[in-house]
Image (cartoon, coloured by chain):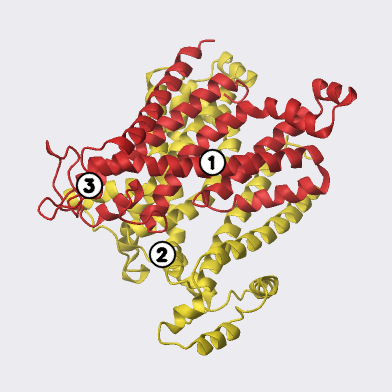
Chain colours: A yellow, B red
Amino acid sequence: MRRYAARRAAALVATLFFVSALVFVVVRILPGDPAALIMGTEGSREASDRLRESMGLNRPLPVQYVEWLARALRGDLGRSIQYDLPVGELIASRLPVTLPLALMAAAFMVVAAVPLGLYAATRHRRAGDYATMILSQIGISVPQFWAGLLLILLFSVTLGWVRSGGFEGWSSGVGAALRSLLLPAIALGLFQAAVLVRATRSAVLDVLREDYVRTARAKGLSELRVVGRHTLRNALIPIVTVAGIQLGQLLAGAIVLESVFALPGLGRLALGAITARDLPVVQGVALFIASTIVVINFAVDLVYTVLDPRIRYE
Amino acid sequence: MRRRPLAHATFTLGAAITLALVAVAGLSLLYTPADPLTMSITGRLQGPSGGHPFGTDQFGRDILSRVMAGAVTSIAVGVIAVGIGAALGVALGLLSGYVGGWLDETLMRLVDAVQGFPAILSALLFTAVFARLTRGSVLELREREFVVAARALGARDRRLLLRHILPNTLAPLVVQATTSFPVAILAEAALAYLGLGTQPPHPSWGLMLKEAQNFLGMNPWFAVFPGGAIATAVLGLNLLGDGLRDLLDPKTA
């Protein structure tokens, strides 16, 4: 187990290295010269050349990369061109929106998907199962941002129950903040819930075929006990794995939902930075999100071995 | 084999929706009820009517015609993204699984890294998915009797890979290609919605939704039809993929 963890950790470091290189390359592919953009149409050629030099943009790419990485490892992601603030500070200031949004979506996903999946599995090949599967198939097909638009259409335009979009911050009250994150979290979690329903159903179905479940039934245990105690606990391993991986995807999906609901989170920060060619910010946010997803996947891998001691690794 | 009828129902429904999508895209190249780009100042933001079954947008353009033309954009993006991803990924996977060793280790870490990126970078992501899938099949096939036998008979690496190993990995690859297609369509729509993809006035479902959001109160139908088109296309392709998986690849079903 310990050797396995050590090997996985080494692989994690290698993966993170590639993540940083990919982020760097992808950001360089974006068209547009930040120095020219800062100077505007007024700046002379010499002035923008000087600026490019002071920003280090005229040096060879590998040198730029190594310097950026070295600083990033020390927690310095550079300075935003747009805001003239450290990128790390900007990211930290947006997390109180994006993180709760992703976590609320994750909570919605688990609360909606696990009972539904369990229900479908116990009604295997009966009407309830088919209905649940059709529902999840539809959930997988609806784009998250369209789900967001439809929720706005229903709850704010037609019914007028909630304001559509905007976020006044946590200082104006936890209840109000949670309310403004509710619709985006549901829209975000819907797709992932639909995926998790299917994962839960097939995991539970697998366990229901096991001999010990048949034994439990033969002993005369109630169906509730068979499913609740003997089945669900053993089905949890694949469910937790899928849910963990989806947590990373929720973080990435939040980017689009923040645009639908005008929430000042990481995604809107990145989007604004892309439009303004604010390369340090684009780089910083992309590195942050991609690394977080890779680290979550790594953690899921480790949790997997803890949950199921039967699994052996060479 | 009690699963067959349902498997076929899924496959048939998925294939029908997918064919309809392709047919609509093809038809839109020859005929649309109105020109997707022609504006009309007087006919802005109308609800569905006989003249405009899906209504009109903020410039008075016919939404039905624009939804039809948007199908071409979605299919083109899907074909390009899945095509690049599959070609690169299969090549990398064959190499990685067959050669093994440090090359395999390095390529797989690269694949891990790419999978940290959202689906928005579709072609990149698909490369990783196809590489991993192909590699897995190659690892398994490399030791199988027919491959070992072919090698003993003096077949070269190239021949072993292309004639003996690759054809046996095709079934899961076809399924993967089908399930990747809707991911690409969703990614294109999301990018266009964010203003980072297809640019106006070119019709794209995601872009139409971005425009519709500003007029939700005036013409809600504007947001309903393009989104419905995305959902229907994705649903059809998902069903097709599930059906194919059941029919071609009994192991994973």
Label annotation for residue B82: 1
Question: Three-letter amino acid code at disc 3?
Answer: Phe
Which chain contains the residue that carries disc 2? A
Residue to which mark 2 is pinned: A268
Q: CA distance from mark 3 to mark 2?
A: 24 Å
Work out which residue is located at the far top of the displayed protein and give it: B1
Crowding around mark 1 (Cα neighbors within 10 Å: few <14, some 14 to 19, many 20+) is: many
Label annotation for residue B222: 3
Question: Three-letter amino acid code at disc 1?
Answer: Val
Crowding around mark 3 (Cα neighbors within 10 Å: few <14, some 14 to 19, many 20+) is: many
Could you tell me residue B249's position as x and y percent? 60, 23
Could you tell me residue A42's position as x and y percent? 40, 87
Q: Nearer the viewer, residue B163 or B122?
A: B163
Label annotation for residue B20: none
Proximity of marks 3 and 2: CB atoms separated by less than 8 Å: no
Question: Three-letter amino acid code at disc 2?
Answer: Arg
Residue lying at 54% horizontally and 21% vertically, measured from the top left? B246
Name the side, left or right, on which B89 lies relative to B9: right
Residue A80 visible at all: no
Residue lying at 36% horizontally and 34% vertically, measured from the top left? B26
Could you tell me residue A285's position as x and y percent? 52, 65
